Structure formats: C-alpha cells, structure tokens
Image: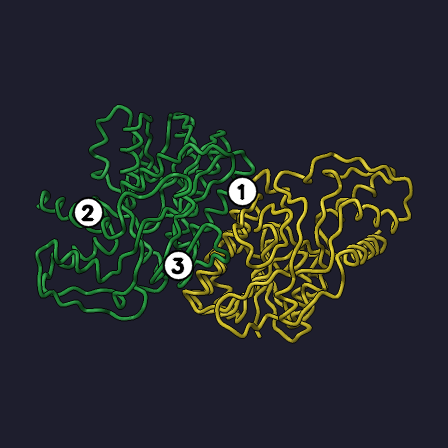
Chain colours: A green, B yellow
Amino acid sequence: MRVLVAGGAGFIGRHLCRELIHAGHRVVCVDNFSLGTRAGIEPLMSVKAFGLYEADITDRERLEQIFEVEEPEYIFQMAANSDIRASAANPDVEYRNTYSTTYELLNCMRKYHVKNLFFASTSAVYGDKRGVVLDENTPDLSPISYYGAAKLGCEALVSAYSYMNDIHSLVFRFPNVIGPGLTHGVIFDFIQKLGINPSRLEILGNGRQTKPYIFIEDLTDAILRFMITPASGVALYNVGVSGETSVTAIADMLCEEMGLTDVVYQYTGGEGGWRGDVPRFCYSADKIHKAGWSARYTSDEAVRKTIRGVLGERNVCL
Amino acid sequence: MRVLVAGGAGFIGRHLCRELIHAGHRVVCVDNFSLGTRAGIEPLMSVKAFGLYEADITDRERLEQIFEVEEPEYIFQMAANSDIRASAANPDVEYRNTYSTTYELLNCMRKYHVKNLFFASTSAVYGDKRGVVLDENTPDLSPISYYGAAKLGCEALVSAYSYMNDIHSLVFRFPNVIGPGLTHGVIFDFIQKLGINPSRLEILGNGRQTKPYIFIEDLTDAILRFMITPASGVALYNVGVSGETSVTAIADMLCEEMGLTDVVYQYTGGEGGWRGDVPRFCYSADKIHKAGWSARYTSDEAVRKTIRGVLGERNVCL
C-alpha cells in the first residue's frame, strides 16, 4: 500500500516507517524536522520504498501537492509536539504542531478521498484520574495539559471526519513510549544528567510518579497488526502493557546499568514532575487483549531494554 | 463586574449582553459581525454600561489590546459558527470561528490573568447516541459534525487552561436554543419558506427528527444563576428542558400560528436533516436540577413562544 507517515522522522515515526517498509508498504515520510531529525531516518534514505518530503504539514498548499503526487492510500498521523513540558510554557506549540497538523491532514484526506487513518493519541486525554483504571469508556475526559487538550481535540476531529467522509480510523491511546533513539523524556534526561555529573541526580517531583512504559517494538507491532480495521468508523484502543514503573525505579535501573553506586537523588518535590504532568495512571488493556494482541514486554522490561539500547548507542557514538 | 462577551452580537450573545447589563455588569461585546449583526445590538448601543469592539477574536494583537484596555474579569465565549449545515461543506469555518476563537481567548486569559470563564458548548459533542439519555458522564463522546468536533476540542482546551492557570470555568452544553431574534435554524427556515410559498413546505429529512428546544430566556437565566462557580476548575452542565419537539410538530405549530391550512409537507427523506445532523437526542437535566435550577418552559412551549415572537417581529418590520 502507498502510505504517508506524517512526522515520520520523529522517535516513533521513524520506527514505524521502518516496520511499514519491512511489511512491504511504500512509505512517504513528511516531516518539518522541528523535533524529528534527518539523522534519525538516515538508515532509510537508501531504501527504494522510502520517500521523504521536508515540509510543514500546516502548509496546506504544499501538503495538497504531496497528496496529488503520491496518492497515499493510508495516512499515519504521528506529527505532534511530543515534549509536554515544553508546551506548558508555550501552548502555541500544541495548537500548531498537534491540532493543526491533524486538521490539515484530515482536510486533505477529505479532498483526495483517502479512506484510512491511523491517529496517535495519548493517555493524556484522560487527565488526572488517580484511582481509576482507565479504559476506552472512562467518562469525563479532562486533560490537564495543553498537549492532552490538543490530542483530545484531534480525536474529536477524527470522529467527525470519519463519519462525514467514510474514513476508517484506528486511534491508539499510547502510554509512555520508549526505546532506542529516544529524543526526550525521563530516561533521556537522566542519562544526560548523569553524563554530566555521575554522583548526583536531580529528579523532578517526589520520584513516585508511576506510569506504564511501552517498548517501541511492541507499539509498532500493534499498529501493524490493527492497521487494517475491518469495520467502518473509528476503532479506539488503549495500548496497555503489564505493570507500571516509578521514576525512582527508573533511576535505580539506570544507575545499575551504568555501574554507578552511591548516586545521590535530589528530588525537586511535589507529586508531578511539572504542572500538567499526570503523576500516576493505570491502563486497562482488556479491549486490545480481547482483540488478540498483548505487549511482549512489561513496563519494567521496556525501561531496562531502553536503557541498554540508549547506553549502547551512546557508547557507539562516543 | 467587567465582563467581555465574545460573539455578543450573535443570537444568544445579544440576549446575554442585555441580561448581564440588567444584572448590573459592565459589558464589552467583541464581534466581527460574521454572523451577528449591528442591528441585533442596536438597542444596547445607547446603554452606558455597554461597549462594542468590532474585531476578529482570532486577531491576537487586537484581542490583547482589548484585554489591556478593558481589563475584563469574566469572559463569556459565545463566539462560534452556529450554522452546522454551513460548516458541513466547509470545515474551515469551525476551525477558525469555533476552535481558534476559543483558543485565542484562553491565551489572553492566561496572559492577563483573567480567572472566570463561561463556555457555550453543545449537545453535538455527544454524537449520535440514540437510545441513550445523555448526561454529563456519558462516555465515548463521538461528534459526527465538524461543529461538534470543534466544540469538543474547545471543551478540552477549557479543561487544560483551567487547570494550568487556576481559571474557574462554567461549561453549559446547550440543546437547540430558540427565541425572538433567531438568525437560523428550523423555525427560521420554515418561516422564510412559508413566506415565499404558503401552500407547501419542504422539510429536510423525514420530519421525525426530535430534539429538546430551550427558550433563550431560560438559557440566560441559567447562565446568570451559575456564572459565579463556587469551586475551582470546570463545572459542566447539560442545560435540559422538559420534553422534545419533532420537526413535523414545529411545522404544525407554525402553520397553526400563521393561520395556514392545507399546507403540503414535502419531506426530502432520510433520518437526519443533513449529514452530521443528530436526528434524535434526549438530555438528562438531573445535574442542573439538583443544583437548584430548572427551565420555565417545556420544549413545546419554547417553540410556540418563539414562533409567536418571530412572527410578531416580522409583522412589526413589514
């Protein structure tokens, strides 16, 4: 199939492009390199089934040209701001990079009659619902971050555009996604910090923030498994894993893997890492399990594999 | 209090401006007259407590100037596309007039530390959930119109901005709002059509579309009653009325009030009036009832009063 991956040079996007190519698809990546990098997709550049457009998805004229030339049959919307902390200081980033990119893609799908969509959503749409096991029917979605708000707005757009234009949409609400090639997030931050000073580690919040982490290979496996949705309309899934991992547990695993002992943890205090951070959430994966898929790695295993992967990359680079 | 009514020249906005002035507030109306009209707010122009800015709310620089000069303490976001049929053909209208206006207002509230918001939402956020009595905890909101999608996106923005900036927000999900000064909708359309040809009436759909209609005075009464929300965060209410009214029942009442007999109804057929129209919905008003408010008029009474009001206006005008 001819597929277009918006944001295909980002952390998740580049893994997805690779897996789509392996599965036999012709992949066109559209990215403005605001967060994604050329280096990230360098290994794909020589592959015949891969094409790249450096373009901003909110540039309607340019996006329409790409749809006209490439005639994609399936759109993967992976373009978004992915740094929630950054947009807390500047919500325009979410309006532009998360909401408006989705809006423009849907408009092109409407105009060029593209009927298949994958949309990357997030646990952040739920807001702070401690004590609730979040499933797809949890009511009263109340995002507390600009990121979660923009993504929920996108889900609403996907719902209406799917209905109005007979689009088949697959929406996954991701937990934290990690793996080799990480560009930000707690593991990335900790490795940076310990690289500068291996004797002490600043930890945002009280370290008890506890979330499920999914390994990137599990995520792309689920996307490829479900990308052809049999029914029309929107199919929505929480992509859950077994277990959750606390921030302090991540620090412990990292110190162990780096061979560091006696690292002093300095907590900034408070329940969340920053305002808009949901300090704890717990996913029900019942729906996707019933549909025949489950993650290969637990949350702790995903963290461990990621740490090893990222440390390995750095050893190779340095 | 110094209040700013965005979209204050529209059908609901102008009634709200009047009632806010009656209640002793200083009202600044901001409207670009895309749907609202100067004629609609003419009666307020000589009132000392009323001020008007002709401005587009998506013009950030201009909006910031207004916030700086007027220093509003309370924002009423009534600016939106209100013609759902129109935006079905051109979703840009919703992106610009519904979503982006809300986004820019919230950004100004964030920048200028305005802590009180009323947001006009809609039953359209639920989507087509026939057989379900819709309450504030109904899960799986799946809008089927671009209008409903934009409004749900706005609710998500209100949630995050309220949390991040300690804003107190009151969100009402309106059913159909009707009353004197209507600018569109089924009653307006029918009166136009029968004015041209009083012997036959084209009715979109099968006429069995059945919805609750609220009289404008009831709506503004509820807004003024709840505008000072005691708790922080977001207070969300379905603003329900007793009963619902079918489209054919509206036609019957209108013919009766106009003294027309033997009008031939010509149905265009289908369940909804147009694609994206929710043909039937039923609201639970339990939450707002428990909070001590209920509508004075039933849905049928609201329709009857509106017909009489609108016909009266036309007789005066002609």
- For disc 2, the marked residue is A305
Looking at the image, tell me whether mark 1 or mark 2 is earlier in sequence order.
1
What's the chain of the residue with tag 1?
A: A
- The image quadrant where one finds the N terminus of chain A is top left
**Distance in Å between CA atoms under marks 1 and 2:** 39 Å
**Distance in Å between CA atoms under marks 1 and 3:** 23 Å
What's the chain of the residue with tag 3?
A: A
Locate residue A261: give its quadrant. Answer: bottom left
Tag 2 secondary structure: helix
Residue drawn at 46 percent across, 58 percent down: B61
Looking at the image, tell me whether mark 3 or mark 2 is earlier in sequence order.
3
Give the x, y percent position of residue A38. Answer: 23, 38
Locate residue A193: give its quadrant. Answer: bottom left
Looking at the image, tell me whether mark 1 or mark 3 is earlier in sequence order.
3
B245 versus A57 height, above or below? below
Residue drawn at 21 percent across, 57 percent down: A250
Q: Residues within 10 Å of mark 2 (few under 14, many from 20)?
A: some
Q: Amino acid at mark 3?
A: Ser
